[in-house]
């Protein structure tokens, strides 16, 4: 009987950085330059640390081609990465927190709202809505429940961008 030695897979190299802070400053200063530099120095797979959180990064044409395959879609998921934010917001589904068919359905529903044209000529209207809400609900010195406030403002701007009511968006998503 012959045995086959398992292939030893090395962990991706970690981008040098300050302990705990990692590469935060370089990423914030110029993200595009940072990732291009890392790609050239470390190759298409590397790890970065920002504020104590280490992530593996896949970049370049090979990574893009891989992500376009079924194997790429099946082995790399976004749901787990975004779950903390989804829970914090009290959402059931988010575009960034869904994979597969549900993600595609959400993208189709939200496509118009994320287009550049959705706010064209409507900036004054959006500012007026925001000012009204701030004056009405969150006066100077008032306690503001931050998560709920962000949810409200986000839903109002989404509603305005898509010209759809929250209930019509829910029906489109659930159908």
Image (spheres, rainbow, N blue to C red):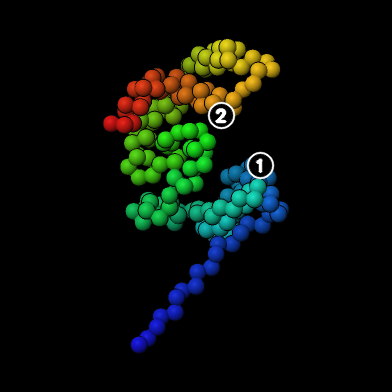
Indicate the secondary structure of the residue bearing disc 1.
helix
Q: Is residue 18 above or below residue 164?
A: below
Badge 2 density bin: few <14, some 14–19, many ≥20, Cα 10 Å: few
| Mark closer to the observer (1, 2) | 2
In percent of width and height, residue 75 lies at 40, 55
Rounded to the nearest whole Å, what is the CA distance between mark 1 and mark 2? 27 Å
Position above or below: 142 against 70: above
Give the residue displayed 48% in from the left and 42% down from the top: 83
Task: Residue at the far left: name it.
Answer: 175
- Residue at point 55%, 62% (across, down): 12
166 relative position to 89: left or right: left
- The image's mark for residue 147 is 2
Q: Position of residue 159 (x, y in %)?
A: 43, 21
Query: Which quadrant: the N terminus?
Result: bottom left
Residue 149: x percent and y percent? 56, 24
Mark 1 or mark 2, earlier in chain: 1
Identify the residue at image location x=68%, y=54%: 17
Q: Is residue 101 rendered to the left or right of residue 146?
A: left
Residue position for label 1: 29
**Can residue 126 be seen in the rendering of this structure?**
yes
User: Looking at the image, which is closer to me, 113 or 100?
Assistant: 100
The front one of 89 and 130 is 89
Q: Residue 109 is drawn in which quadrant? A: top left
Q: Quadrant of the C terminus?
A: top left
**Pointers 1 and 2 in contact (CB under 8 A)?**
no
User: Residue drawn 52% across and 42% down?
Assistant: 84
Whether residue 66 can be seen here: no
Q: Is residue 128 left or right of residue 172?
A: right
Label 1 neighbour load within 10 Å: few <14, some 14-19, many 20+: few
Element at badge 2? helix
- The spot of residue 24 in percent (x, y) is 66, 46
């Amino acid at each position: 009987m012959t045995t086959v030695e398992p292939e030893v897979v090395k962990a991706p190299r970690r981008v040098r950085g300050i302990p705990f802070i990692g590469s935060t400053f370089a990423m914030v200063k110029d993200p595009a330059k940072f990732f291009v530099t890392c790609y050239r120095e470390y190759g298409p797979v590397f790890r970065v640390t920002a504020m104590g959180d280490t992530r593996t990064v896949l970049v370049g044409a090979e990574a893009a081609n891989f992500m376009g395959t079924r194997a790429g879609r099946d082995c790399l998921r976004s749901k787990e990465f975004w779950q903390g934010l989804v829970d914090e917001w009290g959402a059931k589904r988010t575009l960034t927190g869904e994979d597969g068919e549900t993600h595609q359905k959400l993208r189709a529903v939200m496509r118009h709202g994320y287009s550049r044209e959705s706010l064209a000529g409507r900036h004054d209207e959006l500012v007026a809505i925001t000012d009204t809400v701030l004056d009405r609900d969150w006066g100077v010195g008032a306690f503001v429940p931050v998560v709920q406030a962000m949810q409200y403002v986000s839903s109002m701007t989404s509603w305005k961008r898509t010209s759809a009511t929250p209930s019509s968006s829910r029906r489109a998503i659930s159908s």
